[in-house]
Image: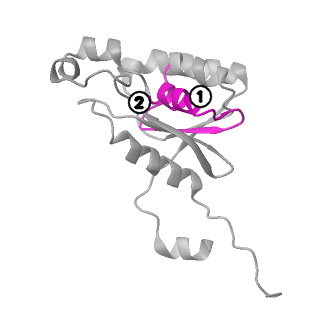
Amino acid sequence: MQNLKPPKAPKHWDQRFLVLASNIAGWSKDPSTKVGAIAVRDKRILAQGFNGLPVGITDSDTRLNDRELRLSMTVHAEMNCVAFAAKSGVCLAGSTMYIWPLMTCSNCAAVLIQADITKIIVPDFVEPIRWQDSFNAAREMFIEAGVSVHRIPIRGPLDSEEEESDH
């Protein structure tokens, strides 16, 4: 037992958590944009959320297929993540939020700053121009509040050789 070495931490945690956020995004019933978010501290998931109508509100075809109505009723993935953490009594202070596939909007940025989330990680994808003003405002808010934002390149599935070397 004396010659046992502690395992090395995997090098790909950010990518793994982004992939997990992409899986959670798939739970959304939104027909056009599916977003997932997870809050993590010390490589442990604290809460997760996806965009959708509030709990107890029926996801009817009428609501989901009327863009203006859907947008007026939808809770963003990041806000759902914070709400579910609060509902469970989980403090997100000092955590990292992984968001798939978009940068956080300015309204969600305000909530994440208030929840004392200290790091935001998003995939390095091209951002839709129609939401660029909100994304830029979010970035400015994060900079001023001292929240770091990282865009992580996403490759294909993790290479099994690389994964084996991480153990």
Q: Quadrant of the N terminus?
A: bottom right
> Nearer the viewer's eye, disc 2 or disc 1?
1
Residue 164 in sight in this render: yes
Q: Nearer the viewer, residue 4 or 132?
A: 4
Please identify the quadrant where the C terminus is shown.
bottom right
In percent of width and height, residue 138 lies at 56, 20
Which residue is farthest right? 2
The amino acid type found where label 2 is placed reads Glu
On residue 86, the disc is 1
Q: Is residue 96 magenta?
A: yes
Identify the disc placed on residue 127.
2
Separation of marks 2 and 1 at Cα, in angstroms = 29 Å
State the scheme by which the image is colored: one colour
Instruction: List x then y, in percent, for residue 61.
Output: 16, 24
Side of 14 relative to 154 (left or right): right
Q: Tell me where residue 82 sits by quadrant.
A: top right
Residue type at the position of mark 1: Ala
Is residue 134 placed above or below 8 in the rendered structure? above
Describe the element under mark 2 as helix, strand or loop.
loop
Residue at (34, 23) in percent of width and height = 56
Q: Residues within 10 Å of mark 1 (few under 14, many from 20)?
A: some
Q: How many marks?
A: 2
Q: Is residue 90 above or below residue 104?
A: below
